[in-house]
Image (tube, helix red, strand yellow):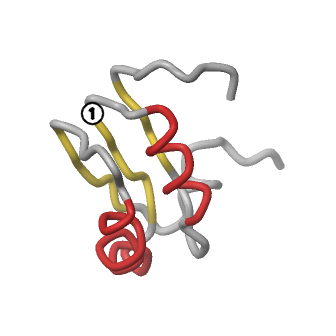
């Protein structure tokens, strides 16, 4: 990441290890934040991401998907 100034919005996807999410949220300080993740990762956000966010975004939302890394990209035959 090349910027240290706050960003308007951040879309964050992960499935197991939230440490990179915490780092990017705290570094970029987004005004709006959206998690793109599987249902199983919601508990990680609530228990291991939210408590570590230094400056909470004004808006926060979820997009629940079975697999955040393959559902956003078309598969090739």
**What residue lies at 60% left-to-right and 20% top-to-bottom?**
3
How many marks do you count on the picture?
Answer: 1
Element under label 1?
strand
Residue bearing the label numbered 1: 32
Residue 63 lies, in percent from the top left, at 33, 53
Q: Position of residue 13 (x, y in %)?
A: 52, 53
Q: Nearer the viewer, residue 22 or 12?
A: 22
Answer above or below: position of 66 versus 70.
below
**In the depicted structure, whether residue 62 falls above or below residue 18:** above
Question: Residue placed at 28% from the left, 54% from the top?
Answer: 62
Q: Along the horizontal axis of the image, is 36 left or right of 2?
A: left
Can you name the residue that lies furthest to the left here? 58
Q: Which residue corresponds to the image point at 58% horizontal and 64% vertical from the top-left?
A: 19
Which quadrant of the structure image shows residue 16? bottom right
**Horizontal side, residue 3 vs residue 38: left or right:** right
In the picture, the quarter occupied by the N terminus is: top right
Can you say whether 46 is above or below 13 in the image? below
Residue 41 in the image: state x and y as whole percent.
43, 75
Residue furthest front as drawn: 54
Task: Pick the residue in front: 69 or 55.
Answer: 55
């Amino acid at each position: 990441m090349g910027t240290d100034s706050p960003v308007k919005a951040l879309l964050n996807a992960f499935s197991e290890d939230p440490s990179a999410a915490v780092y990017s949220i705290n570094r970029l300080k987004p005004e709006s934040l959206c998690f793109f993740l599987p249902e199983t990762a919601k508990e990680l956000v609530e228990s291991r991401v939210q408590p570590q966010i230094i400056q909470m975004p004004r808006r926060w939302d979820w997009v629940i998907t079975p697999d955040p890394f393959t559902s956003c990209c078309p598969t090739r035959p």
